Amino acid sequence: MTVSAGDAGLAIASEGLTKRFRGGQLAVSDLSLEVPRGSVYGFLGPNGSGKTTTIRMLLGLAFPTSGTAELLGVKVPGHANQVLSRVGSLVEGPAFYPFLSGWDNLARYDAADASASPKTAKARIGEALERVGLSNAARKRFRNYSLGMKQRLAIAAGLLQPRDLIILDEPTNGLDPQGTREVRSLIRHIAADGITVFVSSHLLAEVEQVSSHVGVMRGGKLVFQGSLPDLRRTGTARISVRTADEEAASAVFARLGLADSATVPGTASAALGDAEPEKVCAELVHAGVGVRGLSVETPSLEDLFVGLTGEGFDVER
Amino acid sequence: MSSADVAGTTAAPAEAAGAGEEQRSVRSYGRFLRSELRLVFRRRRNQLLLLVVALFPLLIGIALKIASPHGGRGGGGPNNGAAFFAQLAGNGVFLTFIALTMLLILVLPVVVAIVSGDSVAGEAGYGTLRYLLAVPAGRTRLLSVKYLAIVCFAVAATFIVAIVALVTGLVLFPAGPVTLLSGDTVPLASGLLRVLYVTLYISFAMAAVGAIGLAISTFTEHGIGAIAAVMILIVASEVTDQVPQFASAGPYLPTHWWTMFAALLRSPVDTTTLWHGLASFAAYTVIFVLIAWARFTTTDVTS
Ligand SMILES: Nc1ncnc2c1ncn2[C@@H]1O[C@H](COP(=O)(O)OP(=O)(O)OP(=O)(O)O)[C@@H](O)[C@H]1O
Ligand SMILES: [Mg+2]
């Protein structure tokens, strides 16, 4: 699937986007993102895989070492200021002035926006606070907000203006399960308005329910990109047979052209590929293999994700 | 990639807008600047700084009143101090010059260093810088708003010193025609005009300090570090200016021309010195604002 970076169908497009930090750290390497308009794109990857760095480059905060990127068809970081008013964002956690109230903080960001109308500011700030359920804490100082309230305020800041694209970097960080659910439903609502949502997370489970597309990062590289069904399709189903005669079962698998066959005492298994399990079963019985049990296992999305990102707990770089 | 698509989607609204666009951008700039000014002037810390700056001339006036008429032995500025103290007994207006001279040594530059050094670094430290840029505030636009607010604060601090000192002086000491350092006597109105000129001159000096602070502020995420760096720079400059061996470098130091406002208190006024001073402040302002701009528009915001 190759799409040119200027394609109108993409909300975010990048080609060969690379970021090497001054210390020599290659944080993002040769990244070619294709985020379709109207999609909810889950940007997944373990800690340190380069998600935040990518988002910083998309928002014009960090300058790529090489490669190009476009937001809504506008080149960034070169022309970022032309497009960013149509992009709401949350980057690496909430950040506000601790000595200002939630309301005043939003007013501050709104005042910085050259495209925001001062006449509607009050209404827009009120609405944004309402939308994240913070209306009652609007006058409280940010310093006294709880972690979840801070996170909500950051999302509210992203909703101050009508947007075409919302970029959320780990929006559920620090939220309780209820807050997490609320963010998820907020994302659904935003997406229902036709807004493209680009949401990063290190947990597949967190975005699986809301995403239409996913990109998976590992060590600064994009190791998978596509729709969720695409991701599911990368998983190969395996057929396994419980039998006393594993060798004979393996021979049948080989005759049927099944790859990756393996045996452990009492079980023989192989990748199912395009073969039909019923047919394999019939062949086994026909060949006189005593079948005690037969099962077909498809890996869960979680298994596929772990397969893509590696299982280790240690940060890889 | 097809650049035609890009041009088609982004250039069209920009063209259609025309002159109304410019007016709107001026208005939105004004809104941003007001927001910045509110942030600076409503901040408790900055209000305390202005309060401190206001208290000094009051305390100096009271102390000198208690010590007068013969106690005017001052630890004031390097060359102006003693002469000023002698004049104060005769005219309260001179408290302005005394207060400004004394506060110029450390207090005023420190106050400006705090606000300017914290300007960009503070935002980086809070993390609000990344959100301002993502809004998008625009890097150059943000920097210019920051600097204008610093200048406003520096001018406010300088004028507060002058006004409090003037009022205190006129209350505690006699008022009337002002005897200048050169021995000439000018009417009170002319004396007050000179107070205004002196205050403006020092405001320019402080605006230059603000530019230095702004530039240093773009190099770090630690406001305190930037503030300390500006203060070290100022003190180093003042010390260097006192060393006879470095006399030839003197005129190029940022602090060298600060106290030259004394030229306004002689008749005839030595305008060459004043213009040299103003040129020095302008040069420092331009150079350091450019440094700040070059740095701020090209570096990653990773805070
Ligand atoms: N300013 C910087 N200077 C040097 N290296 C950096 C800098 N910022 C990030 N990195 C490195 O770049 C890599 C990617 O970091 P990034 O923050 O993009 O990861 P992430 O995917 O967002 O991780 P997390 O899930 O923990 O937020 C990391 O190895 C990190 O150490
Ligand atoms: Mg991150």
Image (cartoon, grey):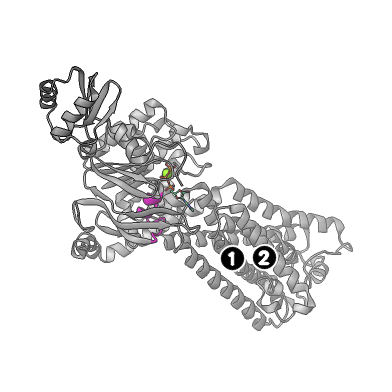
Q: Earlier in the sequence, mark 2 or mark 1?
A: 1
Residue type marked 1: Ile
Left or right position of B76 against A27: right
Question: Is there CB contact under 8 Å for labels 2 and 1?
Answer: yes
Residue at point 71% right, 77% down? B250
Kindly indicate whether the residues beneath marks 2 and 1 are on one polypeptide chain. yes
Query: Residue B212 got which mark?
Result: 1
Give the camera-side residue of A130 and A241: A241
Q: Disc 1: which chain?
A: B
Report, in whole angstroms, how far the alpha carbon at label 2 lies from the one at label 1.
9 Å
Which residue extends farthest right?
A: B70
Give the camera-side residue of B260 and A231: A231
What are the residue bounds of the magenta stretch? Answer: A53-65
Give the camera-side residue of B134 and A271: A271
Residue A267 drawn in magenta:
no
Residue type marked 2: Leu
Secondary structure, mark 2, is helix
- Place of residue B296 in the rendered image (x, y in percent of width and height, measured from the top left): 48, 62
- Asked if A105 appears above or below A248 in the picture, the reply is below
- Circle 2 sits on which residue? B233
- Place of residue B73 in the rendered image (x, y in percent of width and height, measured from the top left): 86, 64
Q: Is residue B163 visible?
A: no
